[in-house]
Amino acid sequence: MTWAVRFEDVTKQYIGEMRHWHLRHDLVRIGRKILSQLQGQVREPEKRTALDHVSFEVQEGEAFALVGPNGAGKSTALKLLTRISHPTRGRIRLRGRIGALIEVGSGIHPELTGRENIWLYGRILGMSRREIARRFDVIVDFAELPHVLDIPVKMYSTGMQLRLGFSIASHLDPDIFVVDEVLAVGDASFQVKCKERMLELLKSGKTLLFVSHDLTAVETICSRGLYLLDGKVQMIGDVNDVVRTYLGWVDARYQERMRREIVPSSSSALTIENISFHDEAGIEQAAFRTGETVEIRLEVTASLPIERPIFSLGISDGRPGTLILCPMPVDAQAPEVLLGPRTVSCRINRLPLLPRVYQAWCSVRSGRTEQDVFDWQVVGAFQVAEGPAGNGRAPASHIHTDAPIHTEYEWQW
Amino acid sequence: MSNAVELVIEGGRRSSLVQGVRELWISREVIWAFAERNVRLKYKQAALGVAWVVLQPLAFLTIFTIIFGRMVHLSAGHTSYPAFALSALVPWLFLQTAVAFGAQSLIQEGALVRKIYFAREAPVLGTVLGSGLDFAIGLALLFILGPMLGTRLSWAVVFILPLMAVLSMLATGVAMMLAALYVYYRDFRYALPLLLQIWMFASPVVYPLSHVPSHLRDVYIVANPAAGILDGFSRTLAEGRPPDLGLLAVSASVSLLIAWGGYRLFKYMEPGFADVI
């Protein structure tokens, strides 16, 4: 195997924030700069680093994914690769013709007819006349537009324009093709078509670089990947591992945010000062593994006396519905009257939950008045992190986004 | 595919003149596509279409003839004033169109610049090339209308080829320079029409070169490379005489310098285009 794309220690910096440049401002700035240099001060202009010493290699014929949160530098990397933008430092090496399916349709001009657009946009993308002539019918058929070929594109529906743009771009016949979020546009049938075209190109031995927030698509299409965060490479490797690591980060950050936003929560009678999650040994943890024991500890302060308090704890994964509900049994040794500070805890043995972030919900009722003194609400969050896979290797994105309950199972033929 | 050409993108500023020219040669189809697109759009969007190309010089010609020919009594020496004015207007309008639209071309194609790669010179060069069609139509008009206005045609007409080459070089250089600056400084939207207006009155378009005081003429010709070229055009087209070759040599040298400078500036600013456009 030989490589098709190589990033060698690539850095990309943007100067200052995005803004329009003004001659007047710049003249003033240049004047100031000269002045400060005369005074012996050297001030570096403010720079935003979008990619920070990034190196990786994509093999010929491979489908390679770039994952990471918004602003991590994925699209910047693709822009450098497709030569739209220029790296500040480092070196990018490419073998073969490169084509991009980035936000298709920007080259389609509404005043021109479909036919004219194919001829002109095709050539701007780098196809020769001969190539266009050879592929013209295929492009038209793929876009499903033979009947409107000679009317201006402004008369087309949005979907038709999209199909035309994608069809032209995807018949460029590159050796390396780059796909950035095209699956996010268009209707369902168009998305299926895009995906099919991508797989078709892959099957014919092309190299693919893929950016998408649809991690299920990332895992089904790609074999290897790169996880970027703040412009730095966090991980390169098997796509499952990369997605898993990335989702772990997403969960941890989500949990952190929940933690900051929720506690303390209070009603007129009761305040939950703190909620903490502990392992079997009683040590506080933020993350657990499927099958472990979790003890949820609540530090509460009752500002009014609550007679025969009954606590309920529930766990959800953020979607509607409670996955686990642990109401306090009536015969639990609850105090007759709760007033002032107190700690109460609930222990869940063998947590049957798959990796992701879970919310803890709580409500408190008085057993005597049968009235809620603390309404059902989110009071905390904890994470179930990726552990040794119990049921073999399933795609990480499924584990993280599909059904949350874990059971032992076995397939037989 | 292992035999595919390897492309190396080096960080930082780039690239040598030779590399740049080679890439332009590779991009010739793209340049041509931009030219074709411009021409098609120009004639599709404007209601009068091609007629504008003819109307514009005719309108200017009428105004100039009334004001400068009749009211100010500007004489054109060897030929009638209208003949002189038309023969200078046609090349001037090419220069003006090429520079004005060339300067805006990158901004106009901003969506493309942000999203796909092509040689960034292509929209500018395509626009200049597209303006060439306007020039050809203007020239046809001049050949048809000229004899009625008093133009004298002779063998000297062959000089329009080198004159056109020099004029195109100048137009390209200025357009490249302004296009690059325009990406960063939108102030040019307001400055550009004014600059072009000043340039026109600083060129022998409304008055012949012979009206420039002789002690200023050397400065005039070096400072404004369009002067020698436009004078050459009016001599060949209106008077049927060959251009002043000394003058043309000066203008050609200055134009070459401007073209080179414009290209270097463009290349210097190019790496940032997609980031700021």
Image (cartoon, rainbow, N blue to C red):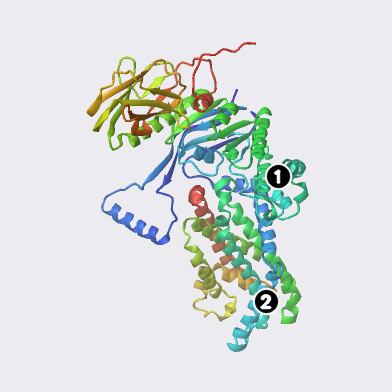
Q: Quadrant of residue A102?
A: top right
Place of residue B13 in the rendered image (x, y in percent of width and height, measured from the top left): 47, 45
Which residue is outermost to the left? A340
Q: Look at the picture and state if A283 lies above or below B219.
A: above
Residue B264: x %, y % from top left: 51, 53
Label 2 vs label 1: CA separation?
A: 39 Å
Along the viewing direction, whichever of B36 and B257 lies nearer the viewer: B36
Q: Residues within 10 Å of mark 2 (few under 14, many from 20)?
A: some
Instruction: Give the vertical position of B77 relative to A387 (above or below).
Output: below
What amino acid type should be assigned to the residue bearing mark 2? Leu
Q: Nearer the viewer, residue A14 or A143?
A: A143
* Subunit of label 2: B
Q: Is residue B54 visible?
A: yes
Q: Does B118 appear above or below A397?
A: below
Dots 2 and 1 on the same chain? no
For the question of whether residue B244 can be seen, the reply is no
Q: Residues within 10 Å of mark 1 (few under 14, many from 20)?
A: some
Name the chain letter of the residue that bears numbered label 1.
A
Label annotation for residue B118? none
Amino acid found under the numbered disc labelled 1:
Ser
Query: Where does label 1 land, which residue?
Result: A128
Residue A50, located in which quarter of the rendered image? top left
Residue with the mark numbered 2: B58
